[in-house]
Image: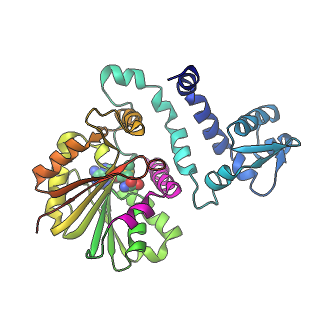
């Protein structure tokens, strides 16, 4: 690694914080209709003119705004990912990262103690936190395209019901139903999340909502309702510890029909737990906020085998843009 790469990595929080703040202030949305100079932009976001110019200049330096004749305008990237009106809006994730930024200041203490820096409540305790968290998941995967990619990759032609365990906003469920029109879907999740899922689906996918059952399931304490031809779980096992994951796979096995398919999408790590790089970094966020971490294929396949699954396969996804991969397994006939 050379000096420039190290220096950029070590001060990356400054860029992240600047983008989060520009988005939160509404700078990108304010430029949707027409370019503005610093005075008009400052008025539009109710901020100080000199400071607004400095953050707008920083966005120009990062390629998220253009500046011509002292007027700021959107770039292709900011139009695509940073406008609330865009179908690929990444803002839900960026605003979530903005809200949990303080949590990262506890990293030293968490490394010393091994204890999380906040309640490991999956953001279920306050409605505004639940909504921010669930919209973050929706925004990330819609902008990146994981759900459509995964739906095309899986063969669900012989499955009649797919359940999305910890399905959150239902972004994957909708993509699976769109790709496989004969399917019926279910989202199994916690009550506060289901409320947000219902709101998002009613806003955006009212037709799909008729084919999706929203079912309260706490997968740590309840049995998984079955029978299902396929069970899909994305970004679930990384929130839980080893014991709970082994038990969860046993529950999934019981809920599946004979021959049924389990699909686990997550950062699946190498045996050393050092690659892929986004997974190794994300594991620190998980340390701060959950009981989990990212697991290796060896660990995941051992839990699956012990639960009775066969045909256990690791399926890579193209990276970039994707940072996670899939493990698929079958319940024997
Ligand atoms: C990281 S999000 C993943 C959402 C979605 N699967 C995705 O990948 O975009 C984790 C999801 O698991 C749900 N969840 C967490 N703990 C749960 C539990 N004990 N029982 C059911 N769902 C749970 C959360 O409410 C949330 O929707």
* Part of the protein shown in magenta: 126-154
Say whether residue 236 is magenta: no
Residue 173 appears anywhere in the view: no
Taking the view exactly as shown, the residue that stands out farthest to the bottom is: 182
- Chief SS of the magenta region: helix
Is 325 in front, or is 241?
325
Say whether residue 136 is magenta: yes
From the viewer's perspective, is residue 122 above or below residue 308? above
Q: How far across and down, in percent of the image, does residue 297 sit?
A: 25, 44
From the viewer's perspective, is residue 1 above or below residue 161? above
Residue 106 appears anywhere in the view: yes
Residue shown at 27% from the left, 73% from the top: 161
Going by the image, does 267 lie left or right of 248?
Answer: right
Is 72 in front, or is 273?
273
Rendered-image quadrant of the C terminus:
bottom left
Going by the image, does 269 lie left or right of 16?
Answer: left
Q: How far across and down, in percent of the image, does residue 317 sit?
A: 39, 53
Taking the view exactly as shown, the residue that stands out farthest to the right is: 69
Quarter-of-image position of residue 187: bottom left
Taking the view exactly as shown, the residue that stands out farthest to the front is: 2
Quarter-of-image position of residue 164: bottom left
From the viewer's perspective, is residue 269 above or below residue 8? below
Residue shown at 27% from the left, 43% from the top: 240
Q: How far across and down, in percent of the image, does residue 129 sit?
A: 47, 47
Residue shown at 47% from the left, 55% from the top: 141
């Amino acid at each position: 690694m050379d000096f420039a790469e190290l220096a950029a990595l070590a001060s990356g929080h400054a860029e992240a914080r600047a983008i989060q703040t520009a988005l939160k202030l509404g700078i990108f949305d304010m430029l949707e209709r027409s370019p503005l100079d610093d005075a008009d932009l400052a008025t539009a976001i109710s901020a100080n003119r000199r400071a607004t110019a400095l953050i707008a200049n920083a966005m120009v330096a990062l390629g998220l705004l253009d500046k011509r004749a002292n007027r700021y305008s959107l770039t292709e990237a900011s139009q695509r990912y940073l406008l609330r009106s865009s179908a690929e809006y990444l803002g839900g994730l960026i605003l979530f990262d903005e809200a949990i930024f303080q949590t990262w200041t506890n990293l030293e203490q968490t490394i010393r103690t091994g204890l999380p820096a906040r309640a490991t409540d999956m953001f279920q305790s306050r409605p505004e936190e639940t909504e921010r968290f669930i919209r973050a998941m929706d925004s990330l995967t819609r902008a990146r395209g994981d759900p459509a990619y995964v739906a095309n990759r899986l063969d669900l032609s012989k499955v009649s019901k797919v359940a999305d365990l910890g399905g959150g906003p239902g972004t994957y469920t909708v993509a699976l139903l769109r790709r496989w029109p004969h399917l019926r879907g279910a989202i199994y999740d916690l009550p506060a999340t289901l409320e947000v899922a219902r709101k998002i689906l009613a806003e955006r996918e009212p037709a799909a909502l008729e084919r999706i059952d929203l079912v309260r399931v706490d997968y740590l304490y309840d049995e998984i309702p079955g029978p299902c031809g396929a069970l899909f779980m994305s970004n679930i096992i990384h929130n839980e510890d080893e014991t709970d994951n082994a038990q969860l796979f046993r529950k999934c096995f019981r809920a599946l029909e004979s021959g049924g398919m389990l699909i686990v999408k997550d950062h699946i790590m190498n045996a050393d737990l050092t690659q892929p790089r986004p997974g190794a970094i994300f594991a620190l966020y998980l340390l701060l906020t959950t009981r989990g971490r990212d697991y290796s294929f060896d660990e995941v396949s051992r839990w699956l085998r012990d639960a009775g699954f066969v045909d256990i396969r690791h399926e890579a996804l193209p990276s970039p843009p994707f940072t996670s991969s899939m493990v698929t397994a079958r319940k024997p006939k």
